[in-house]
Amino acid sequence: MMSSCNSILSLFRAKKTVESKETVMMGDSVVKINGIYLTKSNAICHLKSHPLQLTYDGGFSEIKEQEMFKGTTSLPSHLKSGGDQGKRHARASSRPSSSDLSRLQTKAVPKADLQEKDAEVEVDEVFWNTRIVPILRELEKEENIETVCAACTQLHHALEEGNMLGNKFKRRSILLKTLCKLVDVGSDLLSLKLAKIILALKVSRKNLLNVCKLIFKISRNEKNDSLIQNDSILESLLEVLRSEDLETNMEAFLYCMGSIKFISGNPGFLNEMISKGAVEILINLINQINENTEKCGTCLPNSGHLLVQVTATLRNLVDSPLVRTKFLSISALPQLCTAMEQYMGDKDVCTNIARIFSKLTSYRDCCAALASYSRCYALFLNLINKYQKKQDLVVRVVFILGNLTAKNNQAREQFSKEKGSIQTLLSLFQTFHQLDLHSQKPAGQRGEQHRAQRPPSEAEDVLIKLTRVLANIAIHPGVGPVLAANPGIVGLLLTTLEYKSLDDCEELVINATATINNLSYYQVKNSIIQDKKLYIAELLLKLLVSNNMDGILEAVRVFGNLSQDRDVCDFIVQNNVHRFMMALLDAQHQDICFSACGVLLNLTVDKDKRVILKEGGGIKKLVDCLRDFGPTDWQLACLVCKTLWNFSENITNASSCFGNEDTNTLLLLLSSFLDEELALDGSFDPDLKNYHKLHWETEFKPVAQQLLNRIQRHHTFLEPLPIPSF
């Protein structure tokens, strides 16, 4: 392994090879091949750090025995950056030989092994001869797999009972020599039992690396999951990560972590992994990598590949509520951000962490925790700038930003204050807008049925999530006006509505319209939205006549803001949009009724347009809305009352103004709704009840009381006399 922290990163990228400087001893026979010393018996050497590439969804290719265990000079593809770490392929079982696993029978003992002999503990001769030796003799017979496996289990229990596990007792080398010979038998079950004992004997360096490789090969085959679970090998692997030195055993950690990653893909191991402290161990490992990287000033050899395995494992675990709780309690999110920052150049590390954050930020507590980590916003912007055309990473980063800014005004402000934040979003919008345009088929080639069923394209998926971010940050009063005045942002939003229909991509059209709605809220002089208000109104007409209620709702909301302008009100009447608004009052959809009523309210500000409420039974529809939604939505009830108040400004007789039936209904409803005990006697929880009371007192009650007084002043219960006959 290379000794310089500062040189390894360039070697990864430049695809250079470096000769191994370590000699592997096996007896007295050593041979040098291509700069790597190997024994004639094909003993394994240290793996070298080479450029490690895999396509994202390429799966895992088979690894031949000679590539892994006989002088290989590069890591198996499963452990390289770029692979889809969620897949496993079955393969024919292949074993490292006993000479591969054992270094303890050599005549020349490496210095690393001498450290293990510094404090050897004397063995109880009676226990050794009566309990251990008979089992070793049984193992040497190799009669059948079942017998040998049973003997291995007995041996493990006996060693544990005699306090002979670990590396501090004599005759340990005898045990290892016997165990390593059995690897040649070629049984996955037996190999796992052997590996568990060997790990418990605390082997180090090459022996640790080789036993981790052995477990890795077995774990590759998901058919072996039951064997792994029955033998509790997971605990042994986690102990390696917990107790061994990372820098000394980087390659062993890589194979060990690869096995754990495979295991984590099976939901059946989830509870065991959590209970045995996997989350804490893995986050601590990330912390070690972060500290080592900071200390060296660059990435350690293979540390990026190790991070890929660690983060892929955590990605498999974060669906568990218990894991999410642990993440928060041990401050895992800042550690992941630091790793992403330090390994910004490793797309696979960044993608895995982005996938973790995508899952975590879907939950309120985790989302709030990440949002409070102020450095994350600049980090995500840097990722977008660096990987702008890498859809699989960018789409996740933008999704995360959408979650962070969904319900957090401070997050909206912090993100928007980052240098170049708006320009980065605009650049991303332009990039994927162009990609989407180039992928568009001519209108004549689009099948209606196929188009309606088609999922979003990759470009559309980014645009969907990007427009969501824009809509969210536009809610902030310090950000919305800036976006509304940005010709690039507004222009792309309008272009989206021009060339996209609800059938093309429903979610993108709705998100773009929602963004325009939020921007149209700000009545500022330099607003591009205000400059193009009539053109926007024209674009919205196709949404109003669609069969999509979500699209209709967003269009009506925009009209609610734009109709504060007299020119837009004229447009609405000229194009009979007001009739459509009154028809929507019958939709029995509370949000749509609220927005439609808002448009009608704005229309009645103009005295000349109040008469339109007489068309299509508009008064009755408003009264019905008040009756149906008033007790559950005092803001909607307030809008209805304001609309009726404007309409009745020049009232002389209530019945003539509203109609006799609607007048009587209004008198009953308003009297009832203004009675606090009756109005607020709903089955709401305390918080919701206080919310309703606030809106009832501050919004509904003042205008409703005035409207009731006006109606009562201009209403008589006396019936007029019939016209006399002559």
Image (cartoon, rainbow, N blue to C red):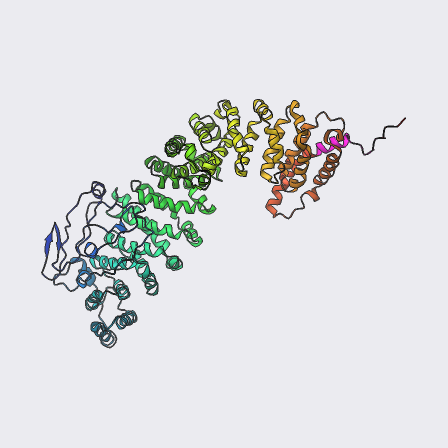
Q: Residue 535: x, y in percent?
A: 50, 25
Q: Is residue 51 magenta?
A: no
Residue 348 is left or right of residue 440, and the answer is left
The answer to whether residue 444 of the structure is visible from this angle is: yes
Q: Nearer the viewer, residue 4 or 563?
A: 563
Q: Residue 715: x, y in percent?
A: 78, 31
Up the image or down, 180 lies above or below 668; here it is below
Q: Is residue 714 magenta?
A: yes
Up the image or down, 583 lies above or below 47; here it is above
The answer to whether residue 410 of the structure is visible from this angle is: no
Dividing the picture into quadrants, the one containing residue 419 is: top left
Residue 616 is left or right of residue 510, and the answer is right
Dividing the picture into quadrants, the one containing residue 672 is: top right
Q: Residue 521: x, y in percent?
A: 53, 30
Q: Residue at (33%, 38%) from the top-left corner?
A: 390
Q: Residue 670: x, y in percent?
A: 71, 37
Residue bounds of the magenta highlight: 705-720
